[in-house]
Image (cartoon, grey):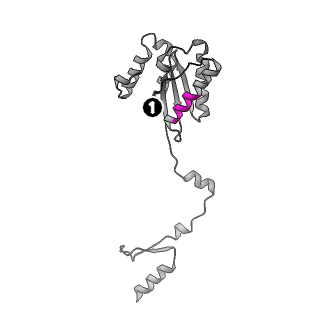
Amino acid sequence: MVERVRERHHRKDPTTRHYPERGNGGTRSTRSYHNSRKFTLAEVRNKIVSTYLSLRYHLIFATKDRQPIIASIWRENLHRYLGGIVKNLEGNAHKVGGTDDHVHLLVELRATHALADFMRNLKRASSSWVHTEVPLETFAWQEGYAAITVSPSALDEVRRYIENQEEHHRARDSREELRLLLERAGIQFDERFFA
């Protein structure tokens, strides 16, 4: 009889829950939870767990057939334009550089970016710029690209590497450079399709 009264009491009191497996009478008060102060919307937003990302890439892509057609007279303007495209695509271009047949970009992307879509838009917009501003109607980028993730500790090293492209290419061509970068990053590639 006493047990029935206790069960009935628990069903009516929304701040007390019944836990039959517990040895302390089977009840636990949740009044402190239900009667706690209400939070403002700003406080709730500050308490919600966020997503934290570090999506930095060293991007490398070349002109079609690696033709040395990015002339020094307009190369710097192309690099600035590439940086502007990255910004318009809601990314952050930390550094842009390159030589007469390829470009390097150190970029930071958002979680909402799909890398393949980002690269397609970057190449399409920059090709269009070359066609109209240089103008060089035959200009095109090769289809592929390299995208190597960059750790925060390597940012300065990659920045310096991109700044000193002319110097690097006195010793090796862009194909050999790409091969070494891919090997260093542990990216496998098939020599038959390496361009």
Task: Verify whether residue 107 appears in magenta.
Answer: no
- 169 vs 47, nearest the viewer: 169
Residue at position x 52%, y 31% in the image: 119
Asked if residue 119 is among those painted magenta in the image, a careful observer would answer yes
Q: Position of residue 126 (x, y in %)?
A: 58, 25
Which quarter of the rendered picture does the N terminus lie within?
Answer: bottom left
For residue 172, which quarter of the picture? top left
Single out the residue that lies furthest toward the front.
138
Helix, strand or loop for disc 1: loop
In the picture of the structure, the residue carrying the numbered disc 1 is 151
For disc 1, the neighbor class at 10 Å (few under 14, some 14 to 19, many from 20) is few
Q: Main secondary structure of the magenta part?
A: helix
Report the span colored magenta.
117-124
Percent coordinates x, y for residue 187 in the rendering? 37, 29
Task: Using the rendered image of the protein, determine whether residue 108 is visible from the camera's viewpoint.
Answer: no
45 and 78: which one is in front?
78
Q: Is 157 drawn above or below residue 73 in the view shown?
A: below
| Side (left or right) of 90 relative to 52 | right
Q: Name which residue lies at 54% across and 27% down.
A: 123
- Horizontal arrangement in the rendering, residue 1 relative to residue 104 (left or right): left
